[in-house]
Every structure is written in structure tokens, then in C-alpha cells.
Amino acid sequence: MAFKILVTSQKGGVGKSTLSANLAAFFSIQQHERTVLLDWDPHGSSSNWLNSAPDTGVHVVHQSLPVDQGGNRPIFDARTQIRRALPNCDVLIADLTWTDSLASELMFEFDMVLVPTSVSEIELAATAGFLNRNRWVFDAASSKRPQLVVCPTRVLTEQLRSNVFSKQRFQVSFMLAPAVLEGQKARELFQRGYLMDQEDLCGRSFYDFAKAIVAARLIRETNMAPVKESQPVGHLSSPALAANKPYRPTGVLEAQSATAQYSILGKYRQRRIAEGESLKAKPVSGLGVPDFLKRLTRPSAKL
Ligand SMILES: Nc1ncnc2c1ncn2[C@@H]1O[C@H](COP(=O)(O)OP(=O)(O)O)[C@@H](O)[C@H]1O
Ligand SMILES: [Mg+2]
């Protein structure tokens, strides 16, 4: 059964196409999955990216949805395209700019809905509005409801510590992905290459993000069972990871410790911490509450 991911938001310029193209390349190259990209945007940015950059084996379809027609027509077209793509596909990624004329039911066609957002106040407000309008989908009692993952994108390193993803603002069940950092490379690589191959902070943050999505998928597919400690999450062959430089992109995610959704991707985070890359040198007095809670969860925790 293919895993279907919708990358969407109402705002343009937040990084939907960048994430869609790079995530598709990641699933194909790093995860060895048969991957399909459905580019539903008239601009065709993500399909152009994959069609012009070195071939990753992703099957690319560019066919915009008739979003302005509203009603059931876009859903009908989406279903038809998905059904056509599925027979030879393990992972399907759809890139779509949402409009209010679209019926929220479209989201039920997917296992996971990724909503990229920057952490600027104006964009957070727009994202919160979008999610609140569609919250019945993510809070639906049906086990078929898609998993909502909010993806901070274009985040500046100085914003990593911001605590902006509060329950007050986002009144819907969601998971928070590790932030993808703002970086010149993300712009330069359009139609040329892929973030997963870059060793700069932006590339490494993307790699981290993509692995977290793999982890979230595993959790979903094992019916929310916890990820086993020994279970590999993705391949570790990226030059970015091989370089093994100290890198802690976690700030925005850590801000979520008090919420239920934190615990999901938090498990993935805990693996990283158990691998010994952080916290060690910090005295307890210097830890924020999320760090402190994580320290407590480590079997060898020394307080
Ligand atoms: N992580 C990033 N760092 C810097 N620039 C980015 C990043 N992600 C996207 N961009 C740039 O932001 C602009 C919008 O990105 P795009 O992926 O087209 O967003 P959307 O599909 O949501 O409109 C593009 O110029 C793109 O190169
Ligand atoms: Mg786009």
C-alpha cells in the first residue's frame, strides 16, 4: 500500500515545492522507494525541479487540479490521478497550493498532510487560520484521518529557539517536524541538485527533516506503535551525516514538549540524543524544560 503525502498551505513562497521535490528525491534515492510526485500547481515548480536536475528515478506528473471549480470536481480529478499513479508506487507526494474553494475532504485521500510555514508572525497566523478551518479533518474520530505535520521552513538559526507552536495558536492535533533552515543553497539548487546532498546547515537540516518524516511514517504504519530503538530510520549514507559535525537543529521542535504530539517525533529526537550528540556537557541548571524531560527519559540519565 503506497504512502500518500500531501504538501500544502494557502500561502505561496513558504517552501512547498522545494520540500516536495527534495522529499521525493530523498525517498527515491535514500530510501529506495518507488516514488511519484504529483505536481498540482499550475507553476510546476516541483516538477520542473525534478525534470531538470539529475535524475532520481522519481516518476513526475504535472497536472494542475481545477481548484477554482470547487465542489467535488477537484476531488474527483485528484482521486483519478492518485489511482493511476498507485500501481507502481511506494510513496506518493502531491504539491498543492490550497484554496478555500477546495473541500477539506480532499485531505482524506492522504496518509499525511505536511504544512510548511515560516515562523514569522504573519505566516504563523495564516497557518493557524488554515489549520483551524480544516481542523475537523485532523481531529476526526476516523482512523483514516491524515496525520498532520507542521513543517517550519526557511527558519533562521536565531529563530530556532523560538517557542511559537503553542496549543493556544494551533488548536488541532499535529506533529511538529524539525525545522528546515533558510539557506542560499535551497534557491541555487532549483533544477540543479538536491538538498540531501549538501553539507551546509540548510542541507543537513533538510536531511534531518526528511528522516523525521520517515520516522513519522513508520509510526503511522505500525499503528502508532513506538519506534524500536534498534530500528534504522533511513540510511545514514548522506555526506552531511558522514561528516558528523556537531549540529543541533532542534530548537523549534523542542518547544513542543508539553503537547501530546511532541511525543511522536520526540521519540526520533530521543534516539539522536541517545546517540550522544547533545546535552552531555550541559549542567541541569542550564537546561530548558524540554531538555530536562528528555534527559529524564534516557536510561543512563545522570542528573
Ligand atoms: N529553505 C529555504 N531557504 C531559502 N530559500 C528557500 C527555502 N525554501 C524555499 N526557498 C525559496 O523560497 C521561494 C519559495 O519556495 P517554493 O518552494 O517555491 O514555495 P511554494 O511552493 O510554497 O510557493 C523560492 O524562491 C525558493 O527558492
Ligand atoms: Mg509551489
Image (cartoon, rainbow, N blue to C red):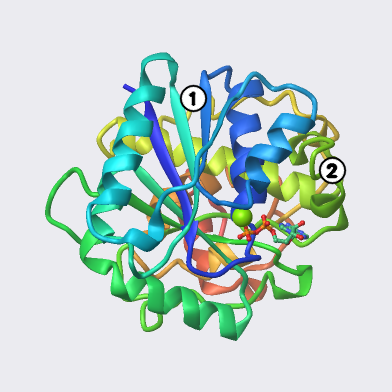
**SS of the residue under disc 1:** loop
Query: Could one spot residue 276 in this view of the protein?
Result: no
Q: Quadrant of residue 219?
A: top left
Q: Residues within 10 Å of mark 2 (few under 14, many from 20)?
A: few
Quick one: 198 or 163, which is closer to the camera?
198
Q: Is residue 262 left or right of residue 173?
A: right
Which residue shows up at 30% across the image and 63% down it? 173
Quick one: 290 or 161, which is closer to the camera?
161
Q: Quadrant of residue 227?
A: top left
Which residue shows up at 36% across the image and 83% down it? 168
Q: Which residue is mark 2?
A: 245
Quick one: 54 or 149, which is closer to the camera?
54
Q: Which x, y percent locates residue 33?
A: 53, 19
Query: Could one spot residue 142 in this view of the protein?
Result: yes
Looking at the rendered structure, the kind of residue marked 1 is Ser
Q: Earlier in the sequence, mark 1 or mark 2?
A: 1
Assign ligand 2 to one image quadrant: bottom right
Q: Which residue is mark 1?
A: 230
Which residue shows up at 52% across the image and 18% down it? 34
Q: Is residue 122 left or right of residue 237?
A: left
Which of the numbered marks, if any, corresponds to residue 258? Answer: none
